[in-house]
Amino acid sequence: MPRVPKLEPIGLPPSGEGVPARTGKQQEAAHDRELVRAAQADDKEAFEELVRRHQHRVMAVAGGILRRREDAEEIAQQVFLKAYFSLKRFDQRAAFSTWLYKITVNECWDMLRKKKVRPLVYESDLSEEQAHQVLASEEKGSMEPDISERLAAQQRVERLLEGLDERDRLMLILKEVEGFAIEEIAEVVDLNANTVKVRLFRARRRIVALARKRGD
Amino acid sequence: MWNLLKKNREACGQFQDELETAASAGSLAATPEELRAALTVACQKHASSCEECRASVEELLSARALLRALPARSKTPAPWFAPRVMAAIAAKEAELRRLGSPWSAVPRFASRLALASAATLLVVSTWVYQRPISAPAKEPSVEAVPESLFDSSQPALSQDDILVSLAERAQ
């Protein structure tokens, strides 16, 4: 039986947000609701559209926790499978994206628990993702910055991120790398927006301090 | 003194809050000046007197510069992903349909079924074999059997009577 989180209804959005952005988000949520209703009535195309709309966000959250592209893709697929087979029980009291984030986070922690490894991986050999980057840079030619420098910088940052709490690391990656809004991050990590802001502030301070200490 | 500290802490909290909002609204490549300009006058005034808050602007930008080295997964196009998910769903549904048919349960339970059958056979055969030994059937005796089932006039023979009659017959 898949473990699918039950969610509370979404509260009203906090004040002080830009009206056009909020309207856009509301329209997206309304479109999601229609697609979910259609998918609940066994419309596979509607579900495929939902996958297309949310795959990047799910992949970003999974990648923020697991850090390996291959793992993130595997988990993202599992998340959508689980969502599909539990969709009839999803009552739409919460946004579809929020529900998906919860499934993603649960799946990622389950995977880490099963693997019993630290989420950050930096190996001496190139990962599949890094190999792709190398190949892509070779195809583009010498106009791109040196790939080995970029990979080294990436590994340095991965090591610095290891010095942070797992949840703070996820928040920082979602905010600064993936471009999530504070409210979205709050949904993912199940904290309120103000707490997210404070923790992001501290996480940045910590990572900069670590970088200075290590001379990066 | 305590009130002053509390007031300062509140102002720092408000500064952090506004800085975060300004950083979210602006571009990722914003300069410290651009970020400070996006703050309210009160916060700008606070930053001029609070060294920690001034430093936080630099920290935000330094952290961003560091994290720029990481690839953004949400911006990587993956046109193959949705078809792959749908194919996995179709495969899973086919598997569930197969598992749902009545005969599909047979291979899964075959070993258990064989074991249960063997155990039952063993118990039944043991019982059948043991039954005649524990309760041997009495051979019907001509003398002992009354002529009629309803004939209650003849008294039941005791063991001594049987022994006496056998001895008499031997003579």
Image (tube, rainbow, N blue to C red):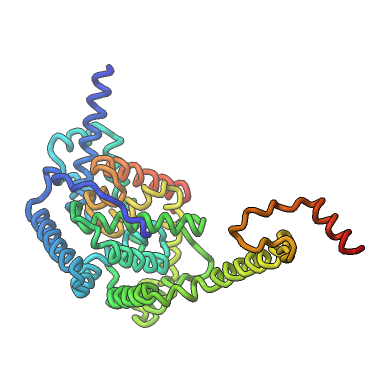
Seen at 24% across and 34% down, the residue is: B13
Q: Nearer the viewer, residue A163 or B149?
A: B149
Instruction: Measuring from the top left, give residue B27's x and y in whole percent.
Output: 20, 57
Q: Is residue A111 left or right of residue A179?
A: right
Q: Quadrant of the N terminus of chain B?
A: top left
Q: Going by the picture, which residue comes out furthest to the front?
A: B153
Q: Nearer the viewer, residue B108 or B24?
A: B108
Q: Going by the picture, which residue comes out furthest to the right?
A: B171
Q: Going by the picture, which residue comes out furthest to the top?
A: B1
Is residue A75 depicted above or below B59 in this figure? Answer: below
Query: Looking at the image, can residue A211 be seen?
Result: yes
Query: Looking at the image, can residue A59 be seen?
Result: no
Q: Nearer the viewer, residue A124 or A75?
A: A75
Rendering quarter of residue A154: bottom left
Q: Quadrant of the C terminus of chain B?
A: bottom right
Instruction: Measuring from the top left, give residue B148's x and y in whole percent.
Output: 62, 62
Instruction: Measuring from the top left, give residue A34's x and y in whole percent.
Output: 13, 64
Is residue A134 depicted above or below A75 in this figure? Answer: below
Instruction: Measuring from the top left, give residue A195's x and y in whole percent.
Output: 28, 40
Q: Is residue B38 left or right of residue A157?
A: left
Is residue B64 depicted above or below B36 in this figure? Answer: below
Q: Nearer the viewer, residue A195 or B105?
A: B105
